[in-house]
Amino acid sequence: MNKLTKRAVDALQKPSKGQTFLWDGELRGFGVRIIPSGLKTFILQYRNAEGRSRRIVIGRYGVLTVEKAREQAQIKLGAVAGGADPAEERAASREAMTVADLCDWYLVEAEAGHILGRRNRPIKASTLAMDRSRIEAHIKPLLGRRQVRALRLADIEGMQADIAAGRTAKQRRPGRGGTTSGGGGVAAHTVATLRSLFAHAARLEVIASNPAEGVRKLAGKKKERRLSVAEIKKLGKTMRVAERNGAHPVALAAVRLMLLTGFRISEVQGLQRDWLHADQGYVHFPDTKSDGQARAIGPSAAQLAAEQPAPKDCPYVFPSDIGDGHFTAAKSCLARLCATAEIEDVTPHTLRHTFGSVAGDLGFSELTIAALLGHAARGVTQGYVHIDQALKLAAARTCEEIARLLDSEEAATIAA
């Protein structure tokens, strides 16, 4: 066996099943292991003072270089020669690890880019922010002090029931910031976060196994609410009255753009001018929930975005009133508009669903609608230069139909 090198580790091919080892020819017991997923980890195998064979993980290749891993292996072998047993020490530490400890480990490692999420890429900052919120608001208060090794499915499903019942819900504090809510949807998402966190820890051998494997999440209600033709007209009338009465123009424009495009609220509020290609009928989002995408956009929507005032050195189409960030109050504006118009049960997702439903009413296929909304990895998501004309036509017709309804004078009278 030759000395373990970066070239040798890079050339190591993943097995179809099981695991493959490559051992160092100079430092006895030091090697690298690869599993079918392609994950490569440095390991050390040794015999303790009792003569029992032990194997420990030193670290993941990519996080550690071959030489750094070799140095750590030498240190651990030195400790073994002195009578220590690193495997026993690690097992003892793992036995005592609490859920709060593991959550803290996850957040540190994920922020450093050491934990890979979808498509084997580092977890996105937006996803990590949501994970942190669920951890601090729900997981730690309910399970933080529990030892991971002693956790059972009943404990995790009990946490889910407590969140659904509102046990961790909190009122909004004075100043800026949101609320900590409960409910079935929040509970199910929190369980998904915890299960994923445990899965990462088990895969990287921080814990022995995933205690959330097999947990049953609460089934969510499918969101099918859409605005009717009459409600779209009524909302448009309300927006015109609000504009005359001095409502925030940026908020009104953001709400209108959501309805004209079917974009997510985060995509609209965070839209940057460089991403908008109004003359070519598309917006290029470098990073969305479904990875980088380009999305076709209709003429009225493109014009609305392009005509927004552009403060100096601000990249956003909808800038914030405070600081140099983007606008964040479109949701509260929508709520006020719907309250005035007496339209109930409307969220930003309702506008997105309305756009898709109007496209369906116009006769466009489910695949086309999925592409318009950024759900499908076809055409529009393959490369924005190649958005086909049929997709642009679908976006244009849907956008202009919704614009016509919003601007209609047939809506019920709204008090000024």
Image (spheres, helix red, strand yellow):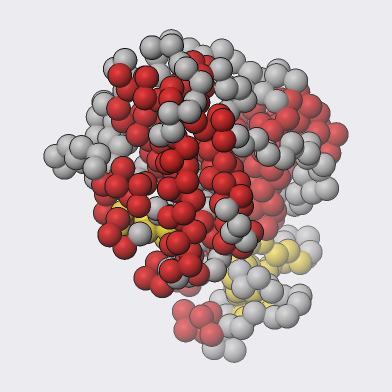
- In front of the other: 403 or 5: 403
As drawn, which residue projects farthest toward the right? Answer: 154
Q: Is residue 344 above or below residue 416?
A: below
**Residue 390 image position (x, y, % from top left):** 48, 67
* Quadrant containing the C terminus in the rendered view: top left
**Residue 356 image position (x, y, % from top left):** 57, 48
**Residue 115 image position (x, y, % from top left):** 54, 55
Q: Is residue 144 above or below residue 399?
A: above
At x 46% / y 54%, what residue is drawn?
Answer: 397
At x 25% / y 29%, what residue is drawn?
Answer: 323
* Quadrant containing the N terminus in the rendered view: bottom right
As drawn, which residue projects farthest toward the bottom? Answer: 1
Q: Is residue 277 left or right of residue 52?
A: left
At x 53% / y 45%, what residue is drawn?
Answer: 355
**Residue 109 image position (x, y, % from top left):** 51, 49
State which quadrant residue 171 falls in. Answer: top right
- In front of the other: 5 or 46: 5
At x 51% / y 56%, what residue is drawn?
Answer: 372
State which quadrant residue 98 falls in. Answer: top right
As drawn, which residue projects farthest toward the front? Answer: 410
Q: Is residue 299 above or below residue 10?
A: above
